[in-house]
Image (spheres, grey):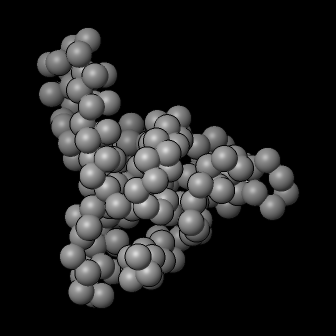
Amino acid sequence: MNIYQAGPLFTEAEQDWHRKAKAAMEESLAAASIIARVSWPGEFFSAEEIRALGPMARHHIFNRCMKDLRSAQIVVALLDGVQVDDGTAFEMGAFYALGQGPILGVRTDFRNAGDTDDSCVNAMLECSCKAVYRSLDDLAAGLVKTIRGL
């Protein structure tokens, strides 16, 4: 089972969140005796590698992310912020179009940023998710239930 973790990863805070989310999911999966690999683009390459690639870096990033996205059975997407990160939105749309499995969203941001009073994010993103969780604990538990239901 491959799980692709999507979300912005440009600041130390975002990278720390991804590490924390990955650890929470792996702990929950291990406790449920589920073997799965959680990957996120922040682990694919270092800033030094990206700098060394120069103008080709964007192609390297795109191809590696798409490779892991295509091998995933589940996508977990961080939906925090006033607007969802554009790369995250693309990854969600691509995975949804591939039809490979469910997308689980997590939005810890208490602000709603959707199209209606009842929407937490843009309708196209929210409705592509099997569920949107409001905490890492709920996400980790929901991930186990989702995998057991596949």
> Is 30 displayed left or right of 148 in the figure?
left
From this viewpoint, which residue is outermost toward the top? Answer: 55
From this viewpoint, which residue is outermost toward the bottom? Answer: 32
Residue 42 visible in the current orientation: no
The answer to whether residue 74 is above or below residue 9 is: below
Q: Quadrant of the N terminus?
A: bottom left
- Where is residue 101? Give x, y as percent: 43, 61
| Residue 147 found in image quarter | bottom left
The answer to whether residue 117 is above or below residue 68 is: below
Q: Residue at x 26, y 41 (%)?
A: 67
Residue 46 visible in the current orientation: yes
Q: Residue at x 50, y 45 (%)?
A: 97
Q: Residue at x 27, y 47 (%)?
A: 68
- Where is residue 42? Give x, y as percent: 28, 44
> Is 79 displayed left or right of 53 in the figure?
right
| Residue 127 found in image quarter | bottom right
The answer to whether residue 38 is above or below residue 80 is: below
Q: Return the residue nearer the eye: 81 or 37.
A: 37
Q: Return the residue nearer the eye: 23 or 121.
A: 121
